[in-house]
Image: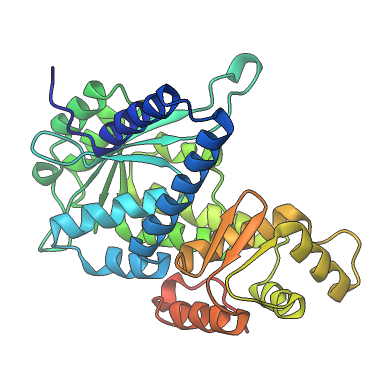
Amino acid sequence: MPIIRDEQKRTQIVDLLTQAYMMELGVHDETISQIETYRDQLLRLVARLRRRSGAALAEMLDAVTSDAKALERAVTEALEYLGFVVEYISGSGEPEGLAEAPLTHGRGRNARRRYTFTYDAKSSKTGRVSNGDVRVSGLLRHKEKYEAEHVLVVAPDYERGALDEECEKHKITPMRSSDLSRLLLLQATLGPIDLLRFRGVFELFDPDAVHDFVEELATELEQQERLSFEDFFEALSAIGYQEPDALTTDVIAREIRRARKSQDFPKVVDVTKVVDGLSVLVPHLIRLNGRQVFLGAEPAALRGAVVALLARVPERYRIARPE
C-alpha cells in the first residue's frame, strides 16, 4: 500500500472509518450528521485561529522576498483567501501546490467552468528572479504531473529577456508578489474577486501585463456600488451585541436599509461581501457560515482592529478603509 503523504487525504480516510464505526454501533444518521457539523465548526475555528490576517499576508509578500519557505506559505494562504481550493504540496521536484477554482458548471458551449493551476513561489536575494531561477521545464513537469490547465509563478520581480520568451513559449503566467498583495487587499476591502474573471490572467505571460490586469480588476471593483465598513459597523452596534453572538446577513441588511431609508440597498449579497472581506482582514474576529455571521468581539473592537490593520498596509496598496 503506498504511503499517503497528503494530510487532507489522511483526514478524509479517518473521517470515513469513524463514520463507518458509528454506523456499525447503531448511531442514528441524524446524530452522526450533528457530530459531523460540530466537528466541521471546530475545524473552521481552529483554522481561523492559526490563520494570518490578509493585511499581515500582504506585508509578508512584500517583506519575505529572500525567504523561500515563508514566501511559498504566504502565496498559499493568499490563494486560499482569494477563494481557491488549495492543496499545499511543496518538496523536492514538486510545485508549491495545486489550486482549483470552485466554480459551478456552466451550460452550452462553455459548460466547463472549473479550472486548476499549479503554482510556485520563487524567492530572490537580489529582488529579481532569472530564467535559471524559475526553471520553466520544472514548472511544465508539475503541470503535466497534476494534470493542471495553467501554471502560475509568483516572485518579487523578474529579469527580462530570456525569461519573457520562455513564459510566452510555454504559457507560464508570471506574477509579482506585490500584485498578489494587491489582489488580497482588493478581496478584503472591495469584495470577492470573480474567479471566472480572474482566469483571464492565465492568458498573460508578461509580469507587466499581469500587473495591468490586476489594476483593471481594481478599477472594476471600485466602480461597483458597495456597502461601506462604516455602515456595517453602525448596523452591528444598533442591533446590539451579546458575547458570543451570531447574527444573520438578512438582519444586518434590513437594519442598514432602515438607517439609510432605502428599500433596495443593501441586499443580503452586499452584506455577505463585506463579511467575506472582514474575514480576510480579521479572521479570528468574524466568520460567515451560510447566512449566519459569528462575531468574536463587540462592534467597536472589531472596527478598531480593522482600522489598525489597514493603517499598516503600504500606501501604494491602500484602497478603502473605515472613516
Considering only vertical position in the picture, is 222 above or below 212?
A: below
Q: Nearer the viewer, residue 292 or 174?
A: 292
Query: Is 184 displayed left or right of 299 in the figure?
Result: left
Q: Nearer the viewer, residue 272 or 124?
A: 272
Query: Residue 105, located in which quarter of the rendered image?
Result: top right
Residue 94 x %, y %: 15, 35
Residue 109 x %, y %: 61, 15
Q: Which residue is drawn at the image coordinates 34% and 32% (left, top)? A: 12
Q: Nearer the viewer, residue 244 or 233?
A: 244
- Spot the residue most to the front: 25
Considering only vertical position in the picture, is 237 above or below 9?
A: below
Considering only vertical position in the picture, is 277 above or below 159?
A: below
Q: Which residue is drawn at the image coordinates 76% and 75% (left, top)? A: 239
Q: Which residue is drawn at the image coordinates 48% and 39% (left, top)? A: 36
Query: Residue 17, located in which quarter of the rendered image?
Result: top left
Residue 146 x %, y %: 26, 25
Q: Nearer the viewer, residue 140 or 226?
A: 226
Tell me if residue 132 can be seen: yes
Quarter of the image with the C terminus in it? bottom right
